């Protein structure tokens, strides 16, 4: 089992910045692919950014150039730096950790942190 705890959400004005953190409970964190997802009211959960165990990153088009995902394996933590925030970025943001062990998928979620972009 891996417990994930997200912090860093809050209320920010359009154009502002926030940094989300997700701390994992296990030192095997380094073997997991990590992702940040978000879910706005009435919408499906969507992948915002992902980072592989090897450090390769990917982003949904709407956040490219504004958001940066990174990981610190020494701290068992993944980050999402969000700049130039827009009202449409408002959502609950979830941290995800996953890896395949043979044919079994280990898939874990945090409890979510609210991000609200509003003036």
Image (cartoon, rainbow, N blue to C red):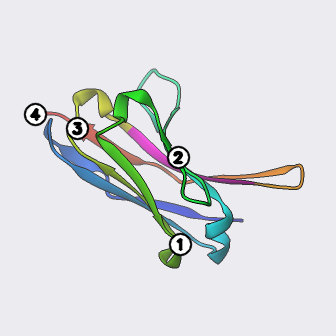
**Separation (CA) of disc 2 from disc 4:** 29 Å
Query: Which residue matches tag 1?
Result: 73
Residue 93 image position (x, y, % from top left): 43, 44
Is residue 82 visible to us here? Answer: yes
Query: Which residue matches tag 3?
Result: 85
- Nearer the observer: mark 3 or 2; the answer is 2
**Separation (CA) of disc 1 from disc 4:** 36 Å
How many numbered badges does the structure rendering display?
4
Query: Which residue matches tag 4?
Result: 119
- Nearer the observer: mark 2 or 4; the answer is 2
Whether residues under marks 1 and 3 lie with C-beta atoms below 8 angstroms apart, the answer is no
Would you identify the image quadrant in which residue 15 lies? top left
Residue 62 image position (x, y, % from top left): 36, 28
Whether residues under marks 2 and 4 lie with C-beta atoms below 8 angstroms apart, the answer is no
Q: Which residues are magenta?
A: 92-99
Mark 4 Cα shell of 10 Å, populated few (<14), some (14-19), many (≥20): few
Image vertical order of residue 34 relative to residue 25, above or below: above
Between disc 4 and disc 3, whose residue precedes?
3
Between disc 1 and disc 3, whose residue precedes?
1
Query: Which residue matches tag 2?
Result: 50
Q: Is residue 108 magenta?
A: no
């Amino acid at each position: 089992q891996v417990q994930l705890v997200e912090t860093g959400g809050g209320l920010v004005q359009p154009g502002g910045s926030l940094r989300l953190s997700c701390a994992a409970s296990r030192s095997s964190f380094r073997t997991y692919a990590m992702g940040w997802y978000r879910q706005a009211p009435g919408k499906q959960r969507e992948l915002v950014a992902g980072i592989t165990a090897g450090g390769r990153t990917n982003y949904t088009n709407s956040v490219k150039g504004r958001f940066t995902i990174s990981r610190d394996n020494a701290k068992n933590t993944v980050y999402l730096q969000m700049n130039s925030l827009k009202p449409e970025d408002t959502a609950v943001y979830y941290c995800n950790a996953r890896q395949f062990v043979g044919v079994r998928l280990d898939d874990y979620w945090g409890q979510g942190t609210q991000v609200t972009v509003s003036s």
